[in-house]
Image (cartoon, rainbow, N blue to C red):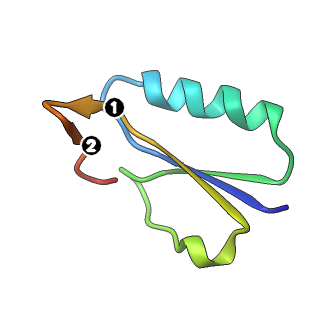
Amino acid sequence: MNTLIAYAGKTGNTAKCARRLAIRLKNVTLIDLNVEEVSPKDFDAVIVASPVYSHKFERSV
C-alpha cells in the first residue's frame, strides 16, 4: 500500500510526529504542505497532520 503523510505546522512538532509515524509504516511519502503541493489521488491511503489554532487547521492544509 502506498501511503501519503501530508503535514504542515509552524513550530516543527507536527513534522516530528509525521516523521515518527513514517518510520512505522511502509511505502510512505512524506510531504510538507508549507513547501509543496501533492495530489492524494496517487496514493492508496492519506494521513493529514496539522496543528489546530483557534479551532482551525493550519492554512496550508
Residue shown at 69% from the left, 31% from the top: 21
Residue shown at 72% from the left, 57% from the top: 3
Which residue lies most toward the bottom here? 41
Q: Position of residue 60 (x, y in %)?
A: 29, 54
Q: Classify 10 Å Cα crowding around label 1: few (below 14), some (14-19), many (20 and above).
A: some
Spatial CA span between label 2 and label 1: 6 Å
User: In this orientation, which residue lies closer to the viewer: 49 or 11?
Assistant: 49
Please tell me whether residue 33 is drawn above or below residue 18 in the rendered image: below
Q: Are marks 2 and 1 in contact (CB under 8 Å)?
A: yes
* Numbered label attached to residue 23: none
Q: Where is residue 55 in the image (x, y as percent from the top left)?
A: 18, 35
Where does label 2 land, which residue?
Answer: 58
Q: Classify 10 Å Cα crowding around label 2: few (below 14), some (14-19), many (20 and above).
A: some
Q: Answer with the quarter of the image where residue 29 lies.
A: bottom right
Q: Answer with the quarter of the image where residue 4 lies.
A: bottom right
Please tell me whether residue 57 is drawn above or below residue 4 in the rendered image: above
Please tell me whether residue 29 is drawn above or below residue 18 in the rendered image: below
Residue shown at 27% from the left, 43% from the top: 58
Where's the N terminus, which quadrant? Answer: bottom right
User: In this orientation, which residue lies closer to the viewer: 47 or 20?
Assistant: 47
Give whichever of discs 2 and 1 has the lower sequence position. 1
Is 36 placed left or right of 30 in the picture? Answer: left
Callout 2 secondary element: loop
Residue shown at 34% from the left, 23% from the top: 11
Please tell me whether residue 6 is drawn above or below residue 42 in the rendered image: above
Q: Position of residue 49 (x, y in %)?
A: 47, 40
Which residue lies most toward the front here? 55
Callout 1 secondary element: loop
Task: Say what amino acid the circle numbered 1 marks.
Answer: Pro
Task: Say what amino acid the circle numbered 2 marks.
Answer: Glu
The number of numbered discs placed on residues in the rendered structure image is 2
Where does label 1 land, which residue?
Answer: 51
